[in-house]
Amino acid sequence: MFYQSKFMEKKKVLFISQEISPFLPKSEVSRGARNLAQGVQEAGKEIRVFMPRFGVINERRHQLHEVIRLSGMNLIIDDNDHPLIIKVASISAARMQVYFIDNEEYFKRKTTVVDDKGNDHADNDERSMFFCRGVLETVKKLGWQPDVIHCNGWMTALMPLYLKKVYHDDPHFANTKVVYNMYGNEGFNNNWDSKFAEKLKFDGVDEDTLNDFKDFDFVNINRLAAEFADGLSIGQDELSADLREIFDNAECEKLDYVAEEHHVKEVSTFLDKVIEAEVLI
C-alpha cells in the first residue's frame, strides 16, 4: 500500500457547461465557463470543453461539424434508446475547441431550457441525464482521462452523482475528481419529473441514495450535486440563502466567490488542491 501524487503531470481538466459564450447569449454561466476554461488552459493545464448543442446555436455561423468517429453510440434513458451525436467548433480567439452533445429529440428545438413562453421544458431531467452521460461516454471514446471535471450550470448537476454512483467502477475515471460550480440566478421553477428517481435507478443509482431526495426542485438538485462533489465553488457574488446553506454545510473542498480579476487564478489553484489530494492505491 502506498500513496501516489500527481504533482509532476500536466493536469487534465474537463469543463462542462450548460452554456458557453459565444455560442449562446452572454450570461453569468456562459461567460464564466468560457473565461475559466480559457484561463485554466493558459495557466498550463490540458482541457476539454463540452456543452449541449441547443437548437438555437447557429451551426453555420459558428462552424460546427460532426465528429463521425465519436458519434454513433446510443444512450438508454428511461429504457429508451437515444442516438448520441458529437459536434465540435473552435473559439479561435481562445485557441480552444468546444465539443457539443447533440440528440434530435432532446436538443433540436429552437430554445434552450425553457420554451418560447418561458416555461421549463418537461424533459429537462432527461436532457441533463443525456448530457452528463454523453460527456462521460465521449471522453472514454477519446481515450482522455480527466483529473477533474468542472461543472457549470444546473444541467451539469448530475455529474457528481454519475461519477460516484454509476461510473465508480469504471477504470477510466478511477482517479477523476469533480467540482460543482454553484450559480444562484440560473435556476428553474418547476420540479423535475416525479419519475426522475426511477430513471436514475434504471441508470444504476441505488435506492438508498435517492431516498434522501424526495422532491427534485432546483435546491435539491444542487444539494444532490454537493453531496457527491469533491469540491464546491461559487460562480457569482449573490447566492440564495438555500444554496449558501448547502455550500456552508458541504463536507468537501470549497472555494467561495472570488472577484473577477482574481477568479481564474484562484480557481486554477483550487483545482490543483482538489486534484492533488493523495490517492490511495
Image: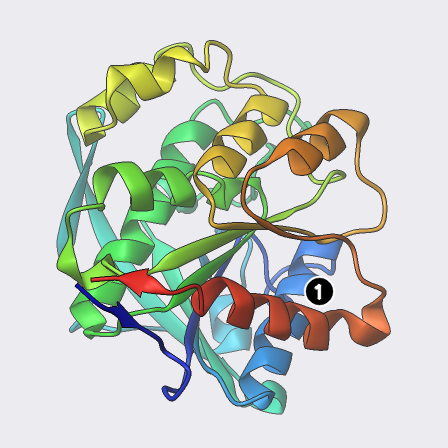
Which residue of the protein is positioned furthest toward the front in this rendering?
1
Q: Position of residue 164 (x, y in %)?
A: 31, 42
* Image height of 107 relative to 24, above or below: above
Q: Residue at x 70, y 77 (%)?
A: 265
Residue 64 visible in this rendered orientation of the protein: no
Tag 1 residue: 31
Residue 67 relative to residue 56: left or right: left
* Image height of 129 relative to 36, above or below: above
Quadrant of the rendered structure where residue 161 is?
Answer: top left
Residue 206 relative to residue 160: left or right: left
Query: How many numbered markers are drawn?
Result: 1
* Image height of 276 relative to 244, above or below: below
Q: Residue at x 21, y 31 (%)?
A: 203
Which one is in front, 277 or 14? 277
Residue 130 visible in this rendered orientation of the protein: yes
Q: Quadrant of the N terminus?
A: bottom left
Q: Residue at x 44, y 70 (%)?
A: 276
Quadrant of the rendered structure where residue 275 is?
Answer: bottom left
Quadrant of the rendered structure where residue 263 is?
Answer: bottom right
Which one is in front, 240 or 83? 240
Residue 164 relative to residue 13: left or right: left
Q: Quadrant of the C terminus?
A: bottom left
Q: Position of residue 23 (x, y in %)?
A: 59, 66
* Image height of 62 relative to 74, above or below: below
* Amino acid type, mark 1: Arg
Other residues around mark 1 within 10 Å, as few (<14) / some (14–19) / many (≥20): some
Residue 256 relative to residue 272: left or right: right
Which one is in front, 92 or 142? 142
